[in-house]
Every structure is written in structure tokens, then in C-alpha cells.
């Protein structure tokens, strides 16, 4: 991995791309105003599919609509994350199934929504479905916008896991992620706590998002990660590297990045606007199931990078 490649990809990411966003709050008329509760369990993956549970609170309407994103910010292609959702079910407060109608690739309507307790489904990952590298006009999302579910690594671009209700776009979210306790995790999303579960082998971390935009704007990295931190001015940079063959380390990558970013800081001056910026670097092995769309997808407080 040449230093020139790293420099080209990361130039401008931290000191130009890390503007913080104002969060929006607002009442909705369709549900009691409590945070939407979402959970992803990485310890119960079946055939590369991770289970998700969405608890929206009580609705006051008879029919509601749930969607996964068709397009996500930062890309210029149709991703259709709804096509990676399997076995979506709506469950009432008595544990019975409600009528669900899939109206298009990314949209489900739920009848008798006043009785809706939760939605459950499984998420397929996109990395091992890539044939030509994803991106514009390709068969799957651009790799840095995609998802990965494997024993040693999870790329949680949350727009691929968590959807939204039409009536609750500005609603708050609490997100719980359960993972093996041996895994390292990094995320720029606000973490409110982590507990060890009764089984003694898994941990559950809870995160908070002021609105759905913050769910889509804050990816996560879980797995056998190598993590390094350094400061650029008052910004803490968290570099997380997944190198399946262990050839490249976060410490080695950091050498190039820190020097470049300190130079940027010197040139640009006082432009700090976020206390933390995360960089998630996934290094592809080049196997048939490996991601093939190389590049980066920037967010306000992080970026996802996929390189060979």
C-alpha cells in the first residue's frame, strides 16, 4: 500500500470534511414521543445475515410505512438497501404477526399499526455480493457505502441495517449492538454505555442518535481491529484498520496520515469543528467474496475507506 495512495485518499478528509451538524428535534403526531429503539445482534448471525429489531413506540395511526434508504448521501448511485432485507415481520403486543405489504424494493406498509410492538428482520451484507466493484450503475452499493458481516469483521454502515418510519424522520434513536466480548469496536456515534451480558461471552453497547440522519452519518467498525489515536490540534483522530493478513498495521498507516494532517492543520489554521474524527480502513484480500470498489465515503465525523 503506497504512501501516495493514502495521501490522495485522505487529503482534506479531516480538516475540510469534519464540520459538525446541528441536530433537529420535533414532535410527531403519529407516535408517543420516545426514542425509537433499534438493536443489531452480531452474535446471532446466520448465513451472513444479522438480526435486527426495531421498536418504534406506540403509533396513533392505523397504517405506517417503514423504509430502508434507496440512495445515501455521498454517493451518486442507487443502492436499494431494502433488497438486502430478509424475512421482515411486524409483531403486535400479543406476539402475533401483523399484515405487512412490501410496496417496492425499499418500502413496507404495516396495517393495524396501533397494535405494532416491533419489527424484526435479517440483513444480508453487500461485500460478498460484489462482482464488479459496486458504485455507479453496478450491481451493489459502492464498497465504502456497503456492509460486511463475517466472523472477524463487521462494517456497519448503519443505513444498511436501520430504516426509518415516514412519520418519525426527526425522531431520536437508541441503538444497541451486541457482539462477542473479544471484538474491538469503534464508532463516532455517541456511546452511552456498554455491559457484559449474562452469557459471559458477549457485550452490548448502547448508542444515541438525535435523528435518523445521525444513524446514517455515523458508521461503526467491529472485529479484529488494529486501532491508533493521535491529535490534530484539538481533534482526536481514531484510526481503525482491518488487515485480514496482518500485513499492514494502524501504527504504520498512522505515520503517513499524521504527518499529512498536521501539515494541513498548519496550512488551514483554526478550523476545528468536531472533537473526534474516525477513519475506518478495510483492506481487501482480493478473494471472490472480498469488496472490489476501492475508495472512500466521507461523513461529517468519520470516513470509511476500502483499499486493496
Image (cartoon, rainbow, N blue to C red):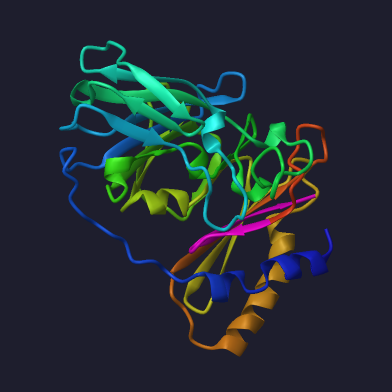
Looking at the picture, how far across and down is residue 38, in whole percent?
36, 35
**Front residue (pair 187, 133):** 133
Task: Please give the range of residues in magenta.
Answer: 296-308
Above or below for 278 versus 291: below
Looking at the picture, how far across and down is residue 244, in whole percent?
74, 40
Q: Which quadrant of the structure image shows residue 127?
A: top right
The reply to whether residue 1 is visible in this rendering is: yes
Above or below for 260 versus 202: below
Looking at the picture, how far across and down is residue 65, in whole percent?
33, 33
Looking at the picture, how far across and down is residue 228, in whole percent?
61, 59
Q: Which quadrant of the structure image shows residue 55?
A: top left
Rendered residue at 51%/64% (across/down): 277
Q: Is residue 37 left or right of residue 301?
A: left
Rendered residue at 52%/56% (across/down): 73
The reply to whether residue 190 is visible in this rendering is: no
Majority secondary structure in the magenta region: strand
Rendered residue at 57%/19% (across/down): 46
**Front residue (pair 71, 123):** 71
Q: Is residue 299 magenta?
A: yes
**Front residue (pair 32, 270):** 32
Q: Is residue 63 left or right of residue 199?
A: left
Give the position of the N terminus as an image quadrant.
bottom right
**Front residue (pair 305, 135):** 135
- Seen as rendered, the residue at the extreme front is 103
Q: Is residue 280 magenta?
A: no
Q: Is residue 137 left or right of residue 232?
A: right
Amino acid at each position: 500500500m503506497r504512501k501516495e495512495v493514502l495521501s490522495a485518499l485522505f487529503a482534506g478528509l479531516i480538516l475540510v470534511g469534519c464540520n459538525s451538524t446541528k441536530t433537529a428535534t420535533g414532535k410527531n403526531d403519529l407516535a408517543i414521543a420516545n426514542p425509537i429503539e433499534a438493536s443489531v445482534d452480531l452474535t446471532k448471525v446466520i448465513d451472513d445475515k444479522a438480526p435486527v429489531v426495531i421498536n418504534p413506540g406506540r403509533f396513533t395511526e392505523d397504517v405506517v410505512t417503514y423504509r430502508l434508504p434507496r440512495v445515501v448521501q455521498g454517493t451518486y448511485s442507487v443502492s436499494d438497501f431494502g433488497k438486502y432485507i430478509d424475512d421482515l415481520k411486524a409483531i403486535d403486543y400479543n406476539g402475533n404477526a401483523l399484515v405487512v405489504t412490501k410496496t417496492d424494493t425499499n418500502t413496507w406498509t404495516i396495517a393495524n399499526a396501533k397494535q405494532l410492538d416491533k419489527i424484526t428482520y435479517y440483513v444480508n451484507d453487500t461485500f460478498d455480493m460484489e462482482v464488479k466493484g459496486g458504485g455507479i450503475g453496478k450491481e451493489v452499493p459502492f464498497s465504502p457505502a456497503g456492509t460486511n458481516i463475517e466472523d472477524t469483521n463487521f462494517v456497519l454502515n448503519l443505513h444498511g441495517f436501520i430504516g426509518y418510519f415516514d412519520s418519525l424522520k426527526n425522531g431520536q434513536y437508541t441503538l444497541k449492538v451486541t457482539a462477542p466480548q473479544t471484538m474491538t469496536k469503534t464508532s463516532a456515534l455517541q456511546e452511552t454505555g456498554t455491559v457484559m451480558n449474562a452469557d459471559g461471552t458477549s457485550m452490548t453497547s448502547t448508542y444515541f442518535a438525535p435523528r435518523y440522519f445521525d444513524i446514517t452519518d455515523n458508521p461503526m467498525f467491529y472485529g479484529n481491529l488494529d486501532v491508533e489515536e493521535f491529535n490534530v490540534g484539538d481533534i482526536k483522530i481514531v484510526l481503525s484498520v482491518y488487515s485480514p493478513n496482518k500485513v499492514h498495521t494502524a501504527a504504520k498507516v498512522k505515520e503517513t496520515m499524521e504527518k499529512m494532517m498536521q501539515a494541513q492543520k498548519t496550512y488551514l489554521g483554526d478550523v476545528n469543528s468536531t472533537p473526534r474524527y474516525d477513519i475506518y480502513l478495510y483492506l481487501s484480500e482480493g478473494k471472490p467474496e472480498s469488496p472490489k470498489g476501492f475508495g472512500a465515503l466521507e461523513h461529517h465525523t468519520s470516513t470509511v475507506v476500502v483499499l486493496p
